[in-house]
Image (cartoon, rainbow, N blue to C red):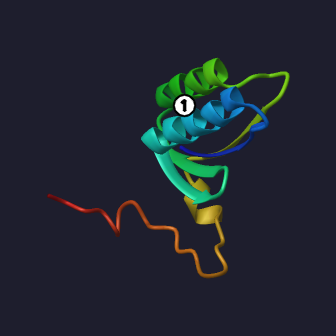
Amino acid sequence: MLVLITYDVSVLTKAGQKRLRDIAKTCMDYGMRVQNSVFECEVAPDQFVKLKNELINIYDPKEDSLRFYILGSKGRQKVEHLGTKITPDPIRDALIL
């Protein structure tokens, strides 16, 4: 299923800057960055639960916010992209080594 993850992290402190890096790194393990603080993740339901729990353990609910948009198994078909930043297609643009 396609899940869109967005986040806003307070970076006024060193701890906040670390949380920002850790959240981005965790999201990169599951999907691809499509804009600053926005990731598209193609995950199975159990992977989503794991990803969400990892992010919940990183963020500070008093200073940061996380948003999860669950677009489902046909979510990619609902995405319309305009502009210069190309979003790779995970099937068409797969790199096989």
In this view, the residue farthest toward the left is 97
Using residue 73 as the reference point, say whether residue 94 is left or right of it.
Answer: left
* Total number of numbered discs in the rendering: 1
Tell me the residue at 61%/27% (across/down).
55
* Residue visible at 79% across and 31% down in the picture: 64
Q: Residue 68: x and y, percent? A: 70, 38
- Vertical position of residue 46 compared to residue 33: above or below: above
Q: Position of residue 56 (x, y in %)?
A: 66, 22
> Residue at (67%, 26%) from the top-left corner?
15
Q: Quadrant of residue 3?
A: top right
| Residue 11 falls in image quadrant | top right
Looking at the image, is 64 positioned above or below residue 7?
A: above
Badge 1 amino acid: Phe
Identify residue for label 1.
48
Residue 69 lies, with reference to residue 84, above or below; the image says: above
**Label 1's element?**
helix
Residue at the limit of the structure toward the right, as seen here: 62
Report the front residue among 14 and 67.
14
Q: Is residue 32 above or below residue 8?
A: below
Closer-to-camera residue (5/47): 5
Q: Position of residue 57 (x, y in %)?
A: 62, 18
In-image side of 27 versus 64 (left or right): left
Residue for point 57% across, 51% down? 40
Where's the C terminus, which quadrant? Answer: bottom left
Task: Give neighbour class at mark 1: few <14, some 14-19, many 20+ (Cα, 10 Å).
Answer: some
Q: Which of 5/77 is in front? A: 5
Residue 29 in the image, given as x and y percentages of width and height: 43, 39
